Image: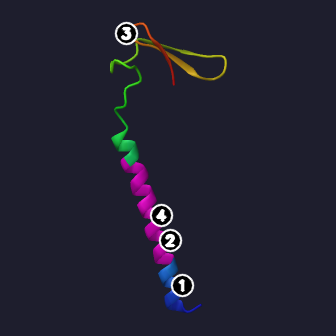
Amino acid sequence: MERRQKRLVYLTLTAVAIALFAAGALYGYMGRNTPICPNGKPPVAQQDDEMGQVLYLCTNGVTVTN
């Protein structure tokens, strides 16, 4: 493998890594305000379940597992 081909492979891998990082950051930024409760309001209380899940009590009385 020539030096130019190695450089091209390294640059391609770097570009893919940067693109994946940017896509993950954008996905996290866009989903940061996703409401837990169906009515869009924040939960009133939360409780840990025996199975390791978190139970959220919403303002309208609905219990949501997330």
Q: Are marks 1 and 2 in contact (CB under 8 Å)?
A: no
Q: Residue at x 34, y 17 (%)?
A: 39
Q: Are marks 3 and 1 in contact (CB under 8 Å)?
A: no
Residue 15: horizontal and vertical position, in percent? 43, 69
How dense is the environment of label 1, judged by Cα within 10 Å: few (below 14), some, or many (20 and up)? Answer: few
Q: Which residues are magenta?
A: 10-26
Point out the frontmost of discs 3 and 2.
Answer: 3
Q: Earlier in the sequence, mark 1 or mark 2?
A: 1
Q: CA distance from mark 3 to mark 1?
A: 59 Å
Q: CA distance from mark 1 to mark 2?
A: 11 Å
- Helix, strand or loop at label 3? It is loop
How dense is the environment of label 4, judged by Cα within 10 Å: few (below 14), some, or many (20 and up)? Answer: few
Residue 64: horizontal and vertical position, in percent? 49, 18
Q: Write down the residue under mark 3.
A: 59
Residue 16: horizontal and vertical position, in percent? 46, 66
Q: Write down the residue under mark 1.
A: 6
In this rendering, the answer to whether 47 lies above or below 17 is above
Q: Earlier in the sequence, mark 1 or mark 4?
A: 1
Relative to the observer, which residue lies in front, 65 or 12? Answer: 65
| Picture disc at residue 63 | none
Q: Residue at x 59, y 90 (%)?
A: 1
Q: Is residue 29 magenta?
A: no
The amino acid marked with disc number 3 is Thr
Point out the frontmost of discs 3 and 1.
Answer: 3
Q: Are marks 2 and 4 in contact (CB under 8 Å)?
A: yes
Q: Write down the residue under mark 4.
A: 17
Callout count:
4
Relative to the observer, which residue lies in front, 1 or 39? Answer: 39
Q: Write down the residue under mark 2.
A: 13
Q: CA distance from mark 3 to mark 2?
A: 48 Å
